[in-house]
Amino acid sequence: MTACPNCGTVGDSTFCPVCGQRQGPLVPTMSAWLREVANELFLVDRTLPRTLGALVAQPGVLTREWLQGHRTKYLQPLRIYLTVALVFFACWAIFGTPSESWYTNRLQFMINAYVDGFNAGSRQRQLTGFSLSSDALARINARLDLIIPLISIPVVAFASRMFIPELKRLLAGGFVFSLHIHAFALVLAVVIVSLKAIFGNVPGWFGFEDISIIIMVIYLTLAVRNAFAGSLRDSFGVALGIALITVFVDAIVILAVYAVVA
Protein backbone atom coordinates (compact mmCIF):
# COMPACT_ATOMS: atom_id res chain seq x y z
CA MET A 1 0.00 0.00 0.00
CA THR A 2 1.44 3.34 -1.02
CA ALA A 3 0.20 6.92 -0.76
CA CYS A 4 -0.44 8.86 -3.97
CA PRO A 5 2.12 11.70 -4.13
CA ASN A 6 -0.49 13.94 -5.77
CA CYS A 7 -3.50 13.67 -3.44
CA GLY A 8 -2.28 11.39 -0.63
CA THR A 9 -4.85 8.63 -1.17
CA VAL A 10 -3.54 5.24 -0.02
CA GLY A 11 -3.92 2.38 -2.48
CA ASP A 12 -2.15 -0.46 -4.26
CA SER A 13 -3.35 0.01 -7.86
CA THR A 14 -1.37 1.28 -10.84
CA PHE A 15 -3.47 4.46 -10.93
CA CYS A 16 -4.77 6.47 -7.99
CA PRO A 17 -8.50 5.68 -7.50
CA VAL A 18 -9.22 9.33 -6.65
CA CYS A 19 -7.15 11.58 -8.94
CA GLY A 20 -6.11 9.02 -11.56
CA GLN A 21 -2.36 9.75 -11.43
CA ARG A 22 -0.09 6.83 -12.33
CA GLN A 23 1.82 5.54 -9.31
CA GLY A 24 5.59 5.23 -9.54
CA PRO A 25 8.87 6.86 -8.52
CA LEU A 26 8.67 10.56 -7.71
CA VAL A 27 11.46 11.27 -10.22
CA PRO A 28 11.35 8.75 -13.10
CA THR A 29 14.32 7.81 -15.25
CA MET A 30 14.82 9.63 -18.55
CA SER A 31 13.61 6.67 -20.62
CA ALA A 32 10.54 6.24 -18.40
CA TRP A 33 9.78 9.95 -18.65
CA LEU A 34 10.07 9.92 -22.47
CA ARG A 35 7.76 6.91 -22.65
CA GLU A 36 5.28 8.75 -20.43
CA VAL A 37 5.40 11.88 -22.62
CA ALA A 38 4.97 9.86 -25.82
CA ASN A 39 2.07 7.95 -24.30
CA GLU A 40 0.37 11.13 -23.10
CA LEU A 41 0.72 12.83 -26.47
CA PHE A 42 0.06 9.95 -28.85
CA LEU A 43 -0.90 6.88 -26.77
CA VAL A 44 1.86 5.09 -28.66
CA ASP A 45 1.58 1.91 -26.61
CA ARG A 46 -1.63 0.63 -28.18
CA THR A 47 -4.19 3.26 -29.16
CA LEU A 48 -2.30 5.12 -31.89
CA PRO A 49 -1.56 2.08 -34.11
CA ARG A 50 -5.12 0.84 -33.67
CA THR A 51 -6.55 4.26 -34.55
CA LEU A 52 -4.30 4.76 -37.59
CA GLY A 53 -5.14 1.28 -38.84
CA ALA A 54 -8.87 1.97 -38.60
CA LEU A 55 -8.45 5.45 -40.10
CA VAL A 56 -6.66 4.18 -43.20
CA ALA A 57 -8.13 0.71 -43.73
CA GLN A 58 -11.69 1.17 -42.42
CA PRO A 59 -13.13 4.50 -43.60
CA GLY A 60 -15.93 5.77 -41.40
CA VAL A 61 -15.44 3.22 -38.60
CA LEU A 62 -13.88 5.75 -36.22
CA THR A 63 -16.85 8.09 -36.67
CA ARG A 64 -19.34 5.24 -36.20
CA GLU A 65 -17.57 4.09 -33.03
CA TRP A 66 -17.58 7.64 -31.66
CA LEU A 67 -21.28 8.11 -32.39
CA GLN A 68 -22.03 4.80 -30.66
CA GLY A 69 -20.15 5.89 -27.54
CA HIS A 70 -17.06 3.66 -27.98
CA ARG A 71 -14.50 6.37 -27.24
CA THR A 72 -11.68 4.84 -25.18
CA LYS A 73 -10.60 2.24 -27.73
CA TYR A 74 -9.33 4.88 -30.18
CA LEU A 75 -7.68 8.29 -30.04
CA GLN A 76 -10.10 11.19 -29.77
CA PRO A 77 -10.84 12.84 -33.17
CA LEU A 78 -8.98 16.07 -32.47
CA ARG A 79 -5.97 14.22 -31.07
CA ILE A 80 -5.60 11.93 -34.08
CA TYR A 81 -5.92 14.93 -36.41
CA LEU A 82 -3.24 16.89 -34.52
CA THR A 83 -0.98 13.82 -34.35
CA VAL A 84 -1.13 13.25 -38.10
CA ALA A 85 -0.73 17.00 -38.71
CA LEU A 86 2.47 16.94 -36.65
CA VAL A 87 3.81 14.07 -38.77
CA PHE A 88 2.82 15.91 -41.94
CA PHE A 89 4.62 19.12 -41.01
CA ALA A 90 7.67 17.15 -39.92
CA CYS A 91 7.67 15.40 -43.29
CA TRP A 92 7.18 18.76 -45.03
CA ALA A 93 10.14 20.22 -43.13
CA ILE A 94 12.38 17.26 -43.98
CA PHE A 95 11.61 17.12 -47.69
CA GLY A 96 11.22 20.87 -48.16
CA THR A 97 8.44 22.95 -49.69
CA PRO A 98 7.92 22.49 -53.44
CA SER A 99 7.92 25.57 -55.64
CA GLU A 100 4.36 24.86 -56.69
CA SER A 101 1.38 23.38 -54.92
CA TRP A 102 -2.06 22.08 -55.79
CA TYR A 103 -3.50 25.46 -54.80
CA THR A 104 -1.47 27.60 -57.16
CA ASN A 105 -1.61 25.04 -59.97
CA ARG A 106 -5.39 25.27 -59.84
CA LEU A 107 -5.26 29.05 -59.41
CA GLN A 108 -3.22 29.33 -62.59
CA PHE A 109 -5.72 27.02 -64.32
CA MET A 110 -8.70 29.13 -63.15
CA ILE A 111 -7.04 32.33 -64.34
CA ASN A 112 -6.26 30.89 -67.76
CA ALA A 113 -9.74 29.39 -68.05
CA TYR A 114 -11.28 32.79 -67.30
CA VAL A 115 -9.04 34.45 -69.88
CA ASP A 116 -9.90 31.86 -72.52
CA GLY A 117 -13.62 32.15 -71.79
CA PHE A 118 -13.52 35.94 -71.89
CA ASN A 119 -11.67 35.96 -75.19
CA ALA A 120 -14.07 33.45 -76.73
CA GLY A 121 -17.05 35.67 -75.91
CA SER A 122 -15.56 39.07 -76.68
CA ARG A 123 -14.76 40.46 -80.11
CA GLN A 124 -13.69 43.93 -79.03
CA ARG A 125 -11.25 43.25 -76.23
CA GLN A 126 -8.83 40.40 -75.74
CA LEU A 127 -7.12 39.42 -72.50
CA THR A 128 -3.83 37.60 -72.20
CA GLY A 129 -2.98 34.91 -69.68
CA PHE A 130 -0.06 35.25 -67.33
CA SER A 131 2.06 33.16 -65.02
CA LEU A 132 2.48 33.68 -61.31
CA SER A 133 5.94 34.74 -60.16
CA SER A 134 7.90 32.55 -57.76
CA ASP A 135 7.54 35.18 -55.02
CA ALA A 136 3.77 35.31 -55.49
CA LEU A 137 3.62 31.50 -55.42
CA ALA A 138 5.55 31.39 -52.15
CA ARG A 139 3.35 34.03 -50.50
CA ILE A 140 0.11 32.44 -51.68
CA ASN A 141 1.18 28.92 -50.71
CA ALA A 142 2.29 30.01 -47.23
CA ARG A 143 -1.10 31.52 -46.49
CA LEU A 144 -3.20 28.82 -48.11
CA ASP A 145 -1.36 26.03 -46.27
CA LEU A 146 -2.69 27.55 -43.04
CA ILE A 147 -6.06 28.88 -44.18
CA ILE A 148 -7.43 25.99 -46.27
CA PRO A 149 -7.38 23.34 -43.48
CA LEU A 150 -9.01 25.77 -41.04
CA ILE A 151 -11.72 26.54 -43.59
CA SER A 152 -12.21 23.00 -44.88
CA ILE A 153 -12.87 21.34 -41.50
CA PRO A 154 -16.02 23.38 -40.67
CA VAL A 155 -17.09 23.36 -44.34
CA VAL A 156 -17.08 19.55 -44.45
CA ALA A 157 -18.80 19.45 -41.04
CA PHE A 158 -21.67 21.69 -42.14
CA ALA A 159 -21.88 20.10 -45.60
CA SER A 160 -22.18 16.68 -43.91
CA ARG A 161 -25.12 17.96 -41.89
CA MET A 162 -26.81 19.05 -45.12
CA PHE A 163 -26.62 15.59 -46.73
CA ILE A 164 -26.57 13.11 -43.81
CA PRO A 165 -29.83 12.90 -41.81
CA GLU A 166 -28.10 11.46 -38.73
CA LEU A 167 -26.03 14.64 -38.39
CA LYS A 168 -28.73 17.26 -38.95
CA ARG A 169 -29.17 17.80 -35.19
CA LEU A 170 -25.71 16.69 -34.15
CA LEU A 171 -23.16 19.38 -35.01
CA ALA A 172 -20.47 17.72 -32.90
CA GLY A 173 -20.89 14.55 -34.97
CA GLY A 174 -20.33 16.55 -38.14
CA PHE A 175 -17.07 17.94 -36.79
CA VAL A 176 -15.94 14.48 -35.66
CA PHE A 177 -16.63 13.11 -39.13
CA SER A 178 -14.78 16.06 -40.69
CA LEU A 179 -11.75 15.63 -38.41
CA HIS A 180 -11.49 11.97 -39.36
CA ILE A 181 -11.73 12.80 -43.06
CA HIS A 182 -9.07 15.49 -42.77
CA ALA A 183 -6.82 13.22 -40.71
CA PHE A 184 -6.86 10.72 -43.57
CA ALA A 185 -6.25 13.56 -46.03
CA LEU A 186 -3.12 14.47 -44.05
CA VAL A 187 -1.95 10.84 -44.14
CA LEU A 188 -2.43 10.94 -47.90
CA ALA A 189 -0.56 14.25 -48.04
CA VAL A 190 2.40 12.68 -46.22
CA VAL A 191 2.50 9.98 -48.89
CA ILE A 192 2.30 12.59 -51.68
CA VAL A 193 5.05 14.77 -50.21
CA SER A 194 7.25 11.70 -49.89
CA LEU A 195 6.55 10.56 -53.46
CA LYS A 196 7.23 14.03 -54.84
CA ALA A 197 10.51 14.12 -52.93
CA ILE A 198 11.50 10.83 -54.56
CA PHE A 199 10.11 11.23 -58.08
CA GLY A 200 9.64 15.01 -58.40
CA ASN A 201 6.60 16.79 -59.83
CA VAL A 202 4.71 14.89 -62.49
CA PRO A 203 4.29 17.16 -65.55
CA GLY A 204 0.84 17.81 -66.96
CA TRP A 205 -2.61 18.03 -65.47
CA PHE A 206 -2.85 14.53 -63.98
CA GLY A 207 -0.29 14.40 -61.16
CA PHE A 208 -0.01 13.09 -57.62
CA GLU A 209 -2.43 15.70 -56.29
CA ASP A 210 -5.08 14.76 -58.85
CA ILE A 211 -4.75 11.07 -58.00
CA SER A 212 -5.22 12.04 -54.35
CA ILE A 213 -8.52 13.75 -55.22
CA ILE A 214 -9.84 10.50 -56.70
CA ILE A 215 -8.66 8.60 -53.62
CA MET A 216 -10.36 11.14 -51.34
CA VAL A 217 -13.71 10.83 -53.16
CA ILE A 218 -13.53 7.03 -52.88
CA TYR A 219 -12.54 7.27 -49.22
CA LEU A 220 -15.30 9.77 -48.46
CA THR A 221 -17.86 7.51 -50.16
CA LEU A 222 -16.78 4.50 -48.10
CA ALA A 223 -16.66 6.61 -44.93
CA VAL A 224 -20.26 7.77 -45.40
CA ARG A 225 -21.42 4.22 -46.13
CA ASN A 226 -19.61 2.63 -43.16
CA ALA A 227 -20.40 5.38 -40.65
CA PHE A 228 -24.09 5.83 -41.49
CA ALA A 229 -25.04 2.50 -43.10
CA GLY A 230 -26.15 3.93 -46.45
CA SER A 231 -26.11 2.29 -49.84
CA LEU A 232 -23.03 2.68 -52.00
CA ARG A 233 -24.92 4.77 -54.57
CA ASP A 234 -26.40 7.11 -51.97
CA SER A 235 -23.06 7.36 -50.19
CA PHE A 236 -21.35 8.34 -53.43
CA GLY A 237 -23.95 11.07 -53.99
CA VAL A 238 -23.39 12.40 -50.47
CA ALA A 239 -19.61 12.26 -50.89
CA LEU A 240 -19.81 14.06 -54.22
CA GLY A 241 -22.02 16.78 -52.73
CA ILE A 242 -19.67 17.33 -49.80
CA ALA A 243 -16.65 17.36 -52.13
CA LEU A 244 -18.20 19.86 -54.55
CA ILE A 245 -19.17 22.26 -51.76
CA THR A 246 -15.69 22.00 -50.25
CA VAL A 247 -13.95 22.54 -53.58
CA PHE A 248 -16.20 25.52 -54.34
CA VAL A 249 -15.45 27.18 -50.99
CA ASP A 250 -11.74 26.40 -51.33
CA ALA A 251 -11.72 27.98 -54.81
CA ILE A 252 -13.25 31.18 -53.42
CA VAL A 253 -10.64 31.24 -50.65
CA ILE A 254 -7.82 30.66 -53.14
CA LEU A 255 -9.00 33.52 -55.36
CA ALA A 256 -9.47 35.78 -52.33
CA VAL A 257 -5.96 35.08 -51.08
CA TYR A 258 -4.61 35.65 -54.59
CA ALA A 259 -6.41 39.02 -54.80
CA VAL A 260 -4.93 40.11 -51.46
CA VAL A 261 -1.39 38.74 -51.81
CA ALA A 262 -0.48 38.72 -55.49
Image: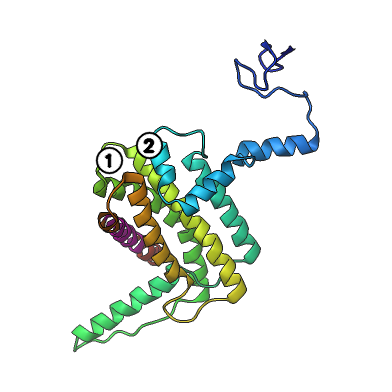
Amino acid type, label 1: Glu
* Position above or below: 25 against 260: above
Residue 262 visible in the picture: no
Q: Distance between the residues labelled 2 and 1?
A: 10 Å
Residue under numbered circle 2:
67
Residue 48 is situated, as x and y percent measured from the top left of the image, at 58, 44
Q: Are marks 2 and 1 in contact (CB under 8 Å)?
A: yes
Give the magenta part as a residue range: 238-252
Question: Is residue 1 at least partly visible in the picture?
Answer: yes
Alpha-carbon neighbours of circle 2 within 10 Å: few (<14), some, or many (≥20)?
Answer: some
Q: In which quarter of the image is residue 1?
A: top right
Instruction: Give the labeled residue for mark 1.
Output: 166
Precedes in sequence: disc 2 or disc 1 = 2
Residue 257 colored in magenta in the image: no
Verify whether residue 239 appears in magenta: yes
User: Amino acid type of disc 2?
Assistant: Leu
